[in-house]
Image (cartoon, grey):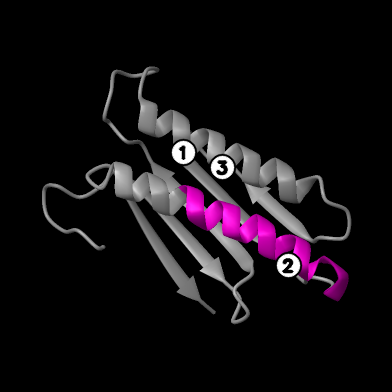
């Protein structure tokens, strides 16, 4: 669900999928603001999900992965060419990432917006 106005979520997760539904890009920006600095459960959940996603795909041989974390609250993960033998593995990882972010959005709709796109 897209929100607009003063109640906009402060975390935005953009999940770009290939036409077959495999993760192509994950861009997360912002902070939740639902708790005190350093003690925000939504930020902690997003951070853990992003770190797990990045480390999982970065550590998998055979994938062309680019990752950057600019200033705090900014993360961009891009997966380049996906070999045929890695597609089913990446499908499982993609499902985990989508489920995690969509669950967070359902639990904290005022603090996170998840946008899913196909390219």
Q: Secondary structure at mark 2?
A: loop
Q: Which residue is mark 3?
A: 50
Q: Nearer the viewer, residue 107 or 17?
A: 107
Give the magenta range. 84-100
Image mark for residue 80: 2
- Whether 92 is among the magenta residues is yes
Left or right of 59? Residue 95 is left
Which of pointers 2 and 3 lies earlier in the amino acid sequence?
3
* Quarter of the view holding residue 33: top left
Left or right of 102? Residue 9 is left
The residue under the point 53% across, 67% down is 16
Task: Classify 10 Å Cα crowding around label 2: few (below 14), some (14-19), many (20 and above).
Answer: few
The spot of residue 67 in percent (x, y) is: 66, 49
> Whole-Å distance between the Cαs marked 2 and 1?
23 Å
Q: Which residue is mark 1?
A: 46
User: Which quadrant is home to the C terminus?
Assistant: bottom right
Q: Secondary structure at mark 3?
A: helix
Q: Nearer the viewer, residue 84 or 70?
A: 84
């Amino acid at each position: 669900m897209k929100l607009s106005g003063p109640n906009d979520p402060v975390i935005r997760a953009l999940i770009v999928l290939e036409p077959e539904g495999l993760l192509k890009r994950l861009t997360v920006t912002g902070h939740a603001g639902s708790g005190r600095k350093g003690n925000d459960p939504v930020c902690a959940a997003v951070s853990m999900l992003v770190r797990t996603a990045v480390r999982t795909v970065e550590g998998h041989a055979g994938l062309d992965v680019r990752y950057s974390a600019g200033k705090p609250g900014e993360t961009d993960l891009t997966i380049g060419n996906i070999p045929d033998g890695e597609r089913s593995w990446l499908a499982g990882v993609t499902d985990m990432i989508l489920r995690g972010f969509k669950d967070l959005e359902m639990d904290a709709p005022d603090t996170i917006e998840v946008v899913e796109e196909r390219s």
